[in-house]
Amino acid sequence: MSNALLLMFSILATGMAIRVPIAFSMLAGGIAYLIFKGQDLGLAAEQILNGLYNGYILLAVPLFIFAANVMNAGTISTRLFDFAKVLVGRMRGGLAQVDIMVSVIFSGMSGSAIADAAGPGLVTIKEMLKKPEYTPGFAGAVVVASATIGPIIPPSIPMVIYALVSGTSVGALFLGGVIPGLLMAVFLMMGVHWVAVKRNMPRDTSVKWADVPSIVMRGLLPLSLPVVLLTGIYSGAFTPTEAAAVAALHALVLAGVVYRALDWKGLFAVTLESARASTVVTLIIASAYLMNYVFTAEGVPQHMAEWVGGMGLTKVQFLLLVNVMMLVLGCFLDVSVILLVFVPMLIPAAKLLGVDLVHFGVVAVVNMMIGMIHPPFGMLLFVTNALTGIPLKEMIREGWLFVGILIAALMLFTFVPQIVLWLPQTMGYKTI
């Protein structure tokens, strides 16, 4: 490791330690590297602007953020909750099962774990806390665990970013996440059932059979969005990036025109929040371009590939190593940082070993989602704590079961690549 690279990492680590926003810490480290190497500081602007200008796919990120915020501001989350209650509400631990089902449905609309926890998740927690059999910690743990499904089932903001850094097909990645996302939901529902039986939770019977038709009708229009998106993408009617615009328009029409749940004041607030969130993501992406220039100049990806190649690892051993590395990084770093800084360093090694990049991408994103629900970083834990006031220690205590379940699912996806690749291959994707 050169002195310049060591300086960059030192500044980055120091910035993170004193809680400087991660984007500014990355920029400061990259600029310090250029100064130490005696290179033109204009390289920073050049790398950032070229990356953003050529990153057409990045347009999907703010549009999916806007779509999710519109759905949460309207009555869409509540309608989805009522619909899911009809489907699984009468199971043991019914409201917890409803939350998982809502997450599956909502994941086909937003692509964001945080949007899931802050929207449908908040609705479910409020309902669960009305029942004495659901402790606050259990309610919060179920919500944060089920929210991890959001970026796995398409559309997915992390997969869009992964496609940007890896050059992989967004459509293939979206398809690759469908079966893993559904399996994650099944595993979590089995975990909830086990807890419900152990704690003798009653079945929910609050939905009357006479109300079922009207509840289903209320949920049909929101349910049409995943169908529209997937049909449009895989029929060639629009690209995954354009699908984000379709999702935003669909959500806006439903919330503002059909349901009249979003007035001009609400729309302004949603737009402002979406702009703020998009700016945060864009700043991280912009600073990551500079960091990636540094890594390329230092030959880090090539050295990483040579190091992995010299270890004589098989594909599965490499993926297990990546799993351990990302699970550890997920304890401390944001998903965007892992995606934009560390994943590009691993891609050459994955290619060298013949690991399919769609499989690698889905496994990586599942890893990062698990990182969002375990301490000490656990972004979803902090978001849910801020929105509901449920103590972190209670969610963490109840959440270890779900972390273990999701890691078991991750191992299954790691050892059986066809779980990820079967659907993309069926739709024409050629494994490299």
Image: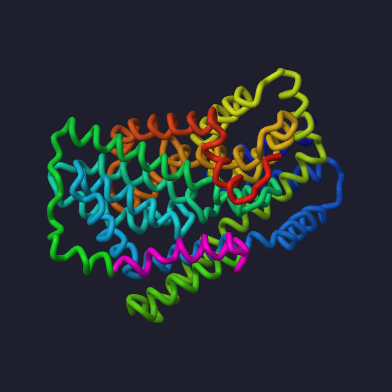
Q: Residue at x 41, y 66 (%)?
A: 224
Q: Residue at x 25, y 49 (%)?
A: 88
Say whether residue 157 is left or right of residue 115: right
Give the image's coloring scheme.
rainbow
Q: Residue at x 82, y 53 (%)?
A: 43
Asked whether the viewer can see residue 233, the reply is yes
364 in relation to 242, above or below: above
Location of the N terminus by quadrant is top right
Q: Quadrant of residue 308?
A: top right
- The percent position of residue 216, horizontal first and vertical second, equals 26, 65
- The percent position of residue 2, horizontal first and vertical second, equals 80, 30
Location of the C terminus by quadrant is top right
Q: Is residue 238 magenta?
A: yes
Q: Nearer the viewer, residue 397 or 123?
A: 123
Say whether residue 270 is left or right of residue 170: left
- The percent position of residue 389, horizontal first and vertical second, equals 28, 49
Magenta residues, as a range?
Answer: 218-240
Q: Residue at x 15, y 49 (%)?
A: 204
420 in relation to 290, above or below: above
- The percent position of residue 274, horizontal first and vertical second, equals 49, 66
